[in-house]
Amino acid sequence: MRLVGMSDLLERLRGRGWRMTAQRRAVAEVLDGDHVHLTADEVLARAAARLPEISRATVYNTLGELVQLGEVAEVAADGRAKRYDPNAHRPHHHLVCARCGTIRDVHPGGDPLADLPAGERFGFTVLAAEVTYRGLCPECAGA
């Protein structure tokens, strides 16, 4: 089941008039979808399965460009390799497995900005909040 507003990366890139080379398309297709949080090496492996001649430099440069465009977000989890999240346009938080590093997007109710009391803002103008829930995924919890 696909929720409206989740990753629609390819559609967003087409709407921006982003030049869609075969290499860029391979990277975007690999990233497009719900709950996608791949490392650069995972993107490379999956893109190479679609387009064997794609290079590591092209994948890394494309990921950097997508982040710079704001179409993909970098997610860092506890010293692990950065992951790339195409769900950059719908506010969400992450649920991270402390053992294997699996990441899922979550959309809890409430407003984390409103939950920060004025006395705890230390004069900051708070622009955004990133909440990460940590636990064990079903596979790791059963191990």
Image: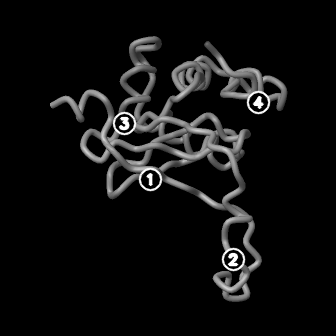
In the rendered image, the quadrant that contains the N terminus is: top right
From the image, tell me which residue sits under label 1.
Answer: 76
SS at badge 1 = loop
- Which numbered dot is residue 102? 3
> From mark 4 to mark 2, how far is it between C-alphas?
41 Å
> From mark 3 to mark 2, how far is it between C-alphas?
31 Å
116 and 102: which one is in front? 116
Q: Nearer the viewer, mark 1 or mark 2?
A: 2
Q: Nearer the viewer, mark 3 or mark 2?
A: 2
Dot 3 and dot 2 residues touching (CB under 8 Å): no
- Dot 1 or dot 2: first in sequence order is 1
SS at badge 3 = loop
SS at badge 4 = loop
Q: Nearer the viewer, mark 4 or mark 2?
A: 2
Q: Crowding at label 2, few (<14), some or many (≥20) Cα neighbours within 10 Å?
A: few
Task: Identify which residue is drawn at 40% across, 34% down.
Answer: 56
Q: Crowding at label 1, few (<14), some or many (≥20) Cα neighbours within 10 Å?
A: few
Q: Amino acid at mark 2?
A: Pro
Q: Crowding at label 4, few (<14), some or many (≥20) Cα neighbours within 10 Å?
A: few
> From mark 3 to mark 4, how far is it between C-alphas?
30 Å
Q: Amino acid at mark 3?
A: Thr
From the image, tell me which residue sits under label 2.
Answer: 117
Task: Identify which residue is drawn at 69% across, 76% down.
Answer: 117
In the rendered image, the quadrant that contains the C terminus is: top left
x then y, percent, for residue 111: 72, 55
Dot 1 and dot 2 residues touching (CB under 8 Å): no
From the image, tell me which residue sits under label 4.
Answer: 18
> From mark 3 to mark 1, how far is it between C-alphas?
12 Å
x then y, percent, for residue 135: 34, 46
